[in-house]
Amino acid sequence: MSNVIFNNMVLRDGHQSLTATRMRTEQMIPALDDLDSLGFGALETWGGATIDSGLRFLGEFPFDRLDALKKGAPKTDHMMLLRGQNIVQYSNFPDDVVEAFVKCSVKHGMDIFRIFDALNDMRNIETAVKAVKASGKHAQGTICYTSSPVHTIEKFIQTGVEIEELGCDSICIKDMAGLIPPYIAYEIIKGLKAKVKIPINIHTHETAGLGAPTYYASIEAGVDMIDTSIVPFANGTGQPDTVRMLSLLENHPRKPDYDLEKLKNLRTHFEKVYKELADFTNFSNERVDTDALTYQVPGGMLSNFRNQLKEQKMEDRFDEVFREIPHVRKCLGWIPLVTPTSQIVGVQAMLNVKFGRWKNFSPQATDIALGYYGTTPAPVDAEVRKIAAEKSGKEPIDCRPADLQESRMDKLRSELKEKGFPDDDENCVIHAMFPQELEKYYKKKKEAEEAPKNISESDGEPKRFALTIDGQRHDVLVEELN
Ligand code: CO
């Protein structure tokens, strides 16, 4: 069997998981030469929370980063994380916006698109997969891993078969929470290898200490690619470190060969960057924490919710809220917990504890219950669906949700024209997802041009998730889990 391939995550998931997605393009550029010459399978450079965070907090236009990274690392394939019909946001967009987004990303150098849907409803990744294939690029279909009574090994394997049938070039088993135990990964990969021909990639996090052993078991089972990162943007809530994984594979027949000297240089560089990002580092991300296993929720969601409950003056009800999560998941058809469903389930658990079960629905939980996010892994509880329909006055649906959306690109373009902003496709797709942030970006840019000495750090608002409860608007802090 051939050597296992390592993809490198330091420029996307590494800093998203350990420093709140705050690494700036200029902090990445000095590392590109070494990263590009190591021979990694791919460099994950874009997508997930990086587009939002770059625009909101760092004052960077998203496609400019992609251009800069591609220029600095032209030899290795660049990979991005795409949330299917949600693109990199929390709700569905029309097909024409998804298609334009993919086209623009290809134009700016993207090679591999890792495409997932939080519900594992493959209808939600179809448009993106087709757009990637039409551009001649690599579409990687994703199985989001979660544990629940309906998520059996067979079900995951079946999802993999669907991904191959959809025309994808490879499959990713994506364990955004670091919950997959080694032998379960082994069984899923063995099963997939018997049923599909396309290569298999596994992605996990070291949050609960299972990451590296899970990769080892996956390699034994014949996985083709694994995702690693570079210390200090590795381990803890990030991916296992590259050097550590290489040591773990010493004498293994599938051990790949990556230049340790270059890896050492990279570590030295990233240690410096990590210090520069000290405002965003925290001890609970760096340590191994088995709480994630106890609650079966992602580590980032745990720390985020401790803060959230404090804001709501509910810190004494932490255990209650976390015990409510399995109930919410069960009623909503055992949806996996990944952006955006992790936020939706967490908020609904909080509402259930605060006001009583299903007395208040968040608008997003209503939409899940009524099918507006797609088909859930198990049916939504009939009573919960009925209450959601009554309270919202909305009809349940079972079609592909994006079928209800009208084309939007023309409208987006004329909105941009009206504002006097550039109206190319790049700006249209960013405007579709982040209208206020794009507006602020151009305003600041203009100010900086008029007063060149006054270029300061962009101080964007923290990311929040809007909720309306009893007619009152509440905003809750958001941490993305990818
Ligand atoms: Co991840």
Image (tube, rainbow, N blue to C red):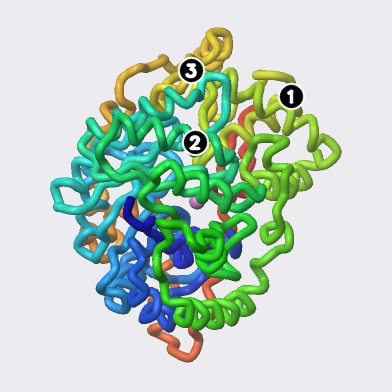
Q: Residues within 10 Å of mark 3 (few under 14, many from 20)?
A: some
Disc 2 residue type? Tyr
Secondary element at tag 1: helix
User: Foreground: 316 or 242?
Assistant: 242
- Disc 3 target residue: 378
Residue at position x 66%, y 67% in the image: 281
User: Foreground: 62 or 439?
Assistant: 62
Question: Horizontally, is 287 left or right of 164 in the view?
Answer: right
- Disc 2 target residue: 145
Disc 3 residue type? Ala
- Disc 1 target residue: 355
Query: How far is the residue under mark 2 from the one under mark 1?
Result: 31 Å
Q: Earlier in the sequence, mark 1 or mark 3?
A: 1
Secondary element at tag 2: loop
Secondary element at tag 3: loop
Q: Earlier in the sequence, mark 2 or mark 1?
A: 2
Question: Horizontally, is 407 left or right of 305 in the view?
Answer: left
Q: Nearer the viewer, mark 2 or mark 1?
A: 2
Quarter assignment of residue 322: top right
Disc 1 residue type? Phe
Q: Residues within 10 Å of mark 1 (few under 14, many from 20)?
A: few
- Res. 438 in view: no
Question: Horizontally, is 445 left or right of 211 in the view?
Answer: left
